[in-house]
Image: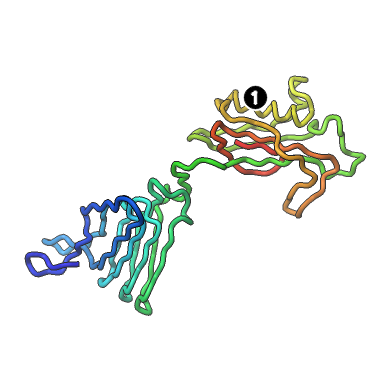
Amino acid sequence: MQQNQNGANVNSFSTGDTIDGGQGTDTVVATLINDRIVESGTKLDVNVKTTNVENARFEVLDEGVVVDAGNMDSVKQYWSVNSDDSGLRLEDVRLGSKLSVTKDITFGMKDVDSESDLIAMFDSASLKNAGTNTSNSQILIEVGYEDKPSDVDNTNPTKDLFLKISFSHGGKAFDSGFLNTSKTAGAFPDTYAGLRDLLKSTLTAQGFGSLVVEFGNDLTSVTTGAGIKPLQVTAKQNLHQRPGRQRIQRRDLVCWC
């Protein structure tokens, strides 16, 4: 905060400013009052563009100060420090170009007045951003029978199994519908390999041919809402994944995307 040419106190960290922290870990420290339109006195949100700035520490001295963080790219920590009882309000917080999930952002208060608060509001489109890191996501599908051994068809284990998978990948939605090997007129056998191949065929037909489907580890139990259930036959894991091994996780046979 500083005085302008008219002797009035104004923010030095103010709307229209641009800060590039460059290499390393950088922190912007600012004491804030409300930005205002000179002629009318109308309050404005503080809207500053920052890049390569990892931490922001604000001391708020005025009631109703709002920092619009929409142009503050990939800030990892926002702090309200020594702020008065009016507190700090952050709006339009975004993950930016470097952060992947909301837990990558920390909000903190230090040495503030007893009734001071900190309010942070995320941009609704920035809650699930994967950023540029798309590795190690998977769909995990575990399939097997918990029936008594006499009811299990070991020769055709997927004959009575219906599998349905849906997900979004690369901005495009996939929905397998109900897959059942016994409904394919012999094109796919009633085995785990047949179910794997049916899934691969369905992915390819919907334009997801780059995803790889393969077996994972054998299963002797599955986790259900009622707990861990032992299987009467050993089930196979399938993996479907794309080149680069992008993976997405879910449970019932085992596939990766």
| Side of 28 relative to 148 (left or right) | left
| Side of 34 relative to 213 (left or right) | left
Above or below — where is 191 with respect to 24?
above
Above or below — where is 111 with respect to 210?
below
Crowd rating for badge 1 (residues with CA inside 10 Å; few <14, some 14–19, many 20+): some
Quarter of the image with the C terminus is top right
Label 1: state its secondary structure: helix
User: Residue 211, located in which quarter of the rendered image?
Assistant: top right
Residue type at tag 1: Ser
Residue that sits furthest to the bottom in the current view: 114
Which coloring applies here?
rainbow
Residue 245 spot, x, y in % from top left: 57, 36
Q: Residue at x 41, y 63 (%)?
A: 107
Quarter of the image with the N terminus is bottom left
Q: State the residue in front, 193 or 115.
A: 193
Residue 183 spot, x, y in % from top left: 75, 25
User: Residue 108, located in which quarter of the rendered image?
Assistant: bottom left
Q: Residue at x 82, y 48 (%)?
A: 230
Residue at mark 1: 201
Residue that sits furthest to the right in the current view: 150
Residue that sits furthest to the front in the current view: 24
User: Residue 42, located in which quarter of the rendered image?
Assistant: bottom left
| Side of 120 relative to 46 (left or right) | right
Residue 227 spot, x, y in % from top left: 76, 54
Q: Residue at x 75, y 37 (%)?
A: 236
